[in-house]
Image: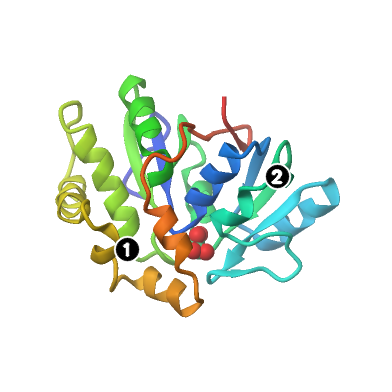
Amino acid sequence: MHLYDVKDRTVVVVDILRATSCMVTAFAHGVECIHPFADLSACKAMKAKGFITSGERDGKKVDGFDRGNSPFEYMGEDVRDKKIAFTTTNGTQAIEKALGAKKIIIGSFLNLSSVIKYLLFGDNNVLIICAGWKGKVNLEDTLFAGAIVEKLRNHIEPDCDAPLAAQYLYNLAKDDMMGFLSNSSHVKRLQRLNIQKDIEFCLTPDQYSIVPVMKDGKLTIT
Ligand code: MLT
């Protein structure tokens, strides 16, 4: 990220497993807004202001928080019209790093086509931030970046080879993403925590037609 000036760009923040998939799911089920926090105690403090406190560290729900980081925790009527304070190991850190961008949107396979449409009709240069794991690369976020590049291939001009590498991997993986990711670091980490159905769900394209957008410190959908 340090190589890019984001102030004139639309930044797509991506954390397929599982932060941005959770956020998209929560909005699809009527959540009013999500305030993302990099800092755990700042997030915790929002409980006193009437927020649901959500998120994880190292994949595990934070002690004392209302919810963890599984999309299935954000599908009930009980999240409708609620405000959520969210912190995660990588996803909300990536959002914080994107602050200052002209626009910040939340991407996941669950809202892939809506993100594509948003970017296609937008007039800014695009930067896709793959949250990865503690500063390191992961495969699932790269596949999502590759999906964007593939679907916008007739409309964009990548400024280096990273988008091309992501596109190449996505085209190799797209017919069996579960299989392609079977040895990947975070899939294995989540499986050690007995989390399997989240992985399958988060890799399912186009479940929801929404795009969460960051404005004034919070995410909402318009
Ligand atoms: C993160 O933000 O690091 C992830 O969403 C971790 C997780 O899968 O819970």
Residue found 74% across the figure and 51% down from its top: 52
Q: How much space separates mark 1 and mark 2, taking CA atoms?
A: 32 Å
Up-down relation of residue 162 to residue 57 (above or below):
above
Q: Is residue 199 something one can see in this rendering?
A: yes
Q: Name the residue under label 2.
A: 79
Q: Of the residues shown, which amino acid type is indicated by label 2?
A: Val
Q: Of the residues shown, which amino acid type is indicated by label 1?
A: Val
- Circle on res. 137: 1
Q: In which quarter of the image is residue 45?
A: bottom right
Residue found 47% across the figure and 52% down from its top: 94
Q: Which of marks 1 and 2 is in front?
A: 2
* Disc 1 residue crowd, few under 14, some 14–19, many 20+, Cα 10 Å: few
Up-down relation of residue 136 to residue 202 (above or below):
below
Percent x, y of residue 132: 39, 60
Residue found 38% across the figure and 47% down from its top: 129
* Disc 2 residue crowd, few under 14, some 14–19, many 20+, Cα 10 Å: some
